[in-house]
Every structure is written in C-alpha cells, then in structure tokens.
Amino acid sequence: MTASLNSKMFNIDKVRADFPILHQEVNGSPLVYLDSAATTQKPQAVIDAITQYYSGYNSNVHRGAHSLADKATYVFENSRKQVAAFINSPSVNQVLWTRGTTESINLVAQSWGQTNIGEGDEILVSALEHHANIVPWQILAEQKGAKVIPIPLDSAGDIDQGAFESLLSERVKLLAISHVSNALGSVNPVADMIAKAKAYGAVTLVDGAQAVAHLPVDVQQLGCDFYVFSGHKLFGPTGVGVLWGQEALLESMPPYQSGGEMIDTVSFDGTTFNGLPFKFEAGTPHIEGVVGLGAGIEYLNALDRDAVKRHEDDLMAYTIEQSEACDGLVRIGQAKHQAGAFSFLLNGAHPSDIGMLLDQQGIAVRTGHHCAQPLMNTLAIPGTVRASFSLYNNRDDIDRLFAGLAKAKQFLL
Ligand code: PMP
C-alpha cells in the first residue's frame, strides 16, 4: 500500500471527542450545537493552551526582563506568525491584534477613513452586511459628508453583480464586503469584486468573520487591502481578532488608540510612534486570547482541510435535502455557494418560537435578525431561524434538527 502524502486526517468521531462542551445534556437531551456562526466551540487544545499560559508563564509581553515574560512574548508573537501563515500574509508585521472583527473595522474606519474619505465620496457595502460592516462606515460618512451605498441582492440572496458594476465609479473610495454572509451563508465572489473595485482605484476591505473557519483564505490571492476576522469564530477565545492590511496603507495610517506599547519615544515636546504592527496595539494586549487563537489555528492546521471542507459541504447538502422534505419550511437565501449557515422560516411562525421549541429539545440555533437588519428589511421578514455548522457537527445533528422541527410543528398548529 502506498503511504498517503498527506498525513493529516479528519475523523469526525475523533474531532467531536476533542470538544468537551459537546458531550453534555441540555434540557434533558444530548446537546446539538448549531450556532457556530455566533461563536465556535473550543477544542481541548485551546482550553489547555490558555490554562498553561495562566498556570505556567503568565506575564506581560514585550517589556519583560525575565524568563516568564520571554516565554509569554515568544508564544504571543508566534501566534502572529501562525495567523500570517494561515492567511498567507507576505509579512508578519501586517497582522495586527484587535478585539475582533468589529474593532478591526472601526480601526480602519477611524484611522484610514478619517484621512482618506472626504465630501461626496462613496463607500459601497452589500445589502447583506453585518451591522459591524455598516455602522462604522455610516458614522464615518456622517463625519465626512460621504455616502454609504448598499449593493442590492438578487432573489437568491447573492450580491447582484450587474448592480455592483453599475455602482462603480471614481467616486467609490471603498468597497467593504463580507466574504461569507452570517445571516444566509452566501459565499460572495470577493476576489472578482475586489479586482473590479480596484480598477476604479477603490480600497477594499473583506469581513472574513464567517469565512476563516470554513474556507482557505489567501489575502494575496484575494488582492484585498484589508481582511478582518474574530478569534472566537475560529476555535479561539472571545475578545481577540485580527486586522490584516497592506503594509504601505498601514504605514500611512495614523494610530487608532494611543498610550503604551505603540510609541517609540515620548517627551513633552512630542511623541514618535512605534513601527508595525505595534503602532496599532496600544496598551497591554489580550495575551491569553492571542495564545488561544494560535492554538485554535494549530488545531485546524493539524486536520486535513480538504476533508473538513468536504465534510462541511456534505452537511450543507444534507441539510438542504432534508429541508426540501420538511413541510412548511421556507429556505431564506439560496445562494449558489453557501457555507456554514442555513436560514429558514417554518409554518409562518415567529423565529424565536421555533428557537425556544428547539432549545427545549437540547438543540441550539440562533433566531432573529442576526445583526443584519437592512437584509431582513430587504427580505421583508422580521428574522430567520439559523442553523450554523462547524467541523464538529455530523449528520446526526441535522437529523435531530429536523426531528426537532417536526415536534415543534405540533405546538405551532
Ligand atoms: N461580521 C460578520 C459577518 C459576523 O458574522 C460577525 C459576528 N456575528 C461580525 C462581523 C462581528 O464580529 P465580532 O462580534 O466578533 O466583532
């Protein structure tokens, strides 16, 4: 037998065993966790990495003159290298730590935006964006007399590419779009859209919050100027995230917050700033979060990513197939390519009633507008029920979801 060149494996039973939280009963039934788009669960390796940090080498980073601080700094900076490799950044200095996707976008809006957006400029976002990729641009536009323009969707929930092209002009200074929609799971053709926007000289930002755990991300291949994501949707802790940017842009941008760490020299005559990435990392960072995020990436890297993708695609296809046999279920969003999230309504019931009836059976889903109120307004619905998957879900989870919905229907009649 020839040995496989790819020694990485994906065994769903082993993967499930790596996530301790999955093995418990909720409301008297074994937990089915279908809310990974809100936050992913954490493998034991991430929990252990955080415990080891606090029990073995808790110290502040960069400034220490002792061995524990050296170790903390080493692990902290090693996580940055892991992120750089994970998204194929040309340089590690282009990876900045933030509190998450939301803070990364606010940083770009208030640092790059304040200096580069002016009166009459246009910022294009899609109609399916998360509020985190709308509101910071609205605030900036208000401050600068610019306009935020939504790119409409087609009836399937894909971004209308014809409409996008007709909105492009020299007035467009920024295109800010999600790689994958958190509400509908649509995978957007971001590389293509970036190339078109760049032809008009626009700067481009991709919100990768929902993409990083499902798709390979290569910032060089995408050609974007900024790529942002949160650690907690990538098997890491909450409160830590990443802003990746083109080096020349980051160099040209003023600091976002100021204080310790981000300076070179300080005197009452003036202050000079540190270089990248530290210029944007004022104050003591979320060291435990960075350590845990590095461990989350290491966990994912140790798996056969192609097999993970096939597994997740199978879960999505199986869910769609089961949904077609479920009377009264209306799929919300039927994008050509869907990853991670499946949104629906059932028997015209309010999504929160469905969520509650599923929760009583130990099935965790998300209901509501999913921080995408403009999208819900476009679809003329108050919200959806969203089942979202990760690599640790299996077909049994989907069977439990549909059995749960069948039971829920009895209470809705
Ligand atoms: N964008 C998208 C597409 C998201 O799904 C989320 C989280 N639901 C965010 C932005 C905001 O992420 P965070 O709350 O981690 O900053």
Image (cartoon, rainbow, N blue to C red):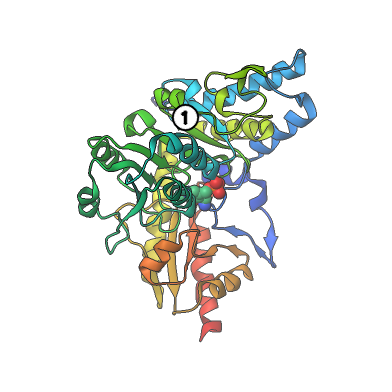
Residue 237 versus residue 369: which sits nearer the camera?
A: 369
For residue 158, what is the image quadrant?
bottom left
Q: Is residue 122 visible?
A: yes
- Left or right: residue 35 versus residue 377 is right
Percent x, y for residue 67?
76, 14
- Left or right: residue 317 versus residue 102 is left
Q: For mark 1, what is the residue? A: 86
Q: Residue drawn 38% across and 32% down?
A: 225
Q: Residue drawn 40% across and 48% down?
A: 180
Percent x, y for residue 51?
74, 34
The residue under label 1 is which amino acid type?
Answer: Phe
Q: Residue furthest bottom?
A: 413
Residue 9 versus residue 244: which sits nearer the camera?
A: 244
Can you say whether 45 is above or below 314 in the image? above
Percent x, y for residue 32?
58, 59
For residue 245, what is the image quadrant?
top left
Q: Residue furthest right?
A: 55
Q: Residue drawn 37% across and 68% down?
A: 379
Residue 181 versus residue 216: which sits nearer the camera?
A: 181
Residue 259 versus residue 209: which sits nearer the camera?
A: 259
- Left or right: residue 352 versus residue 378 is right
Label 1: how many Cα within 10 Å (few below 14, some 14–19, many 20+): some
In which quadrant will I find the N terminus? Answer: top left
Percent x, y for residue 359?
61, 68
Q: The residue tagged with tag 1: helix, strand or loop?
A: helix
Q: Is residue 7 visible?
A: no
Total marks in image: 1
Can you say whether 348 is above or below 59 in the image? below
Can you say whether 156 is above or below 311 in the image? below
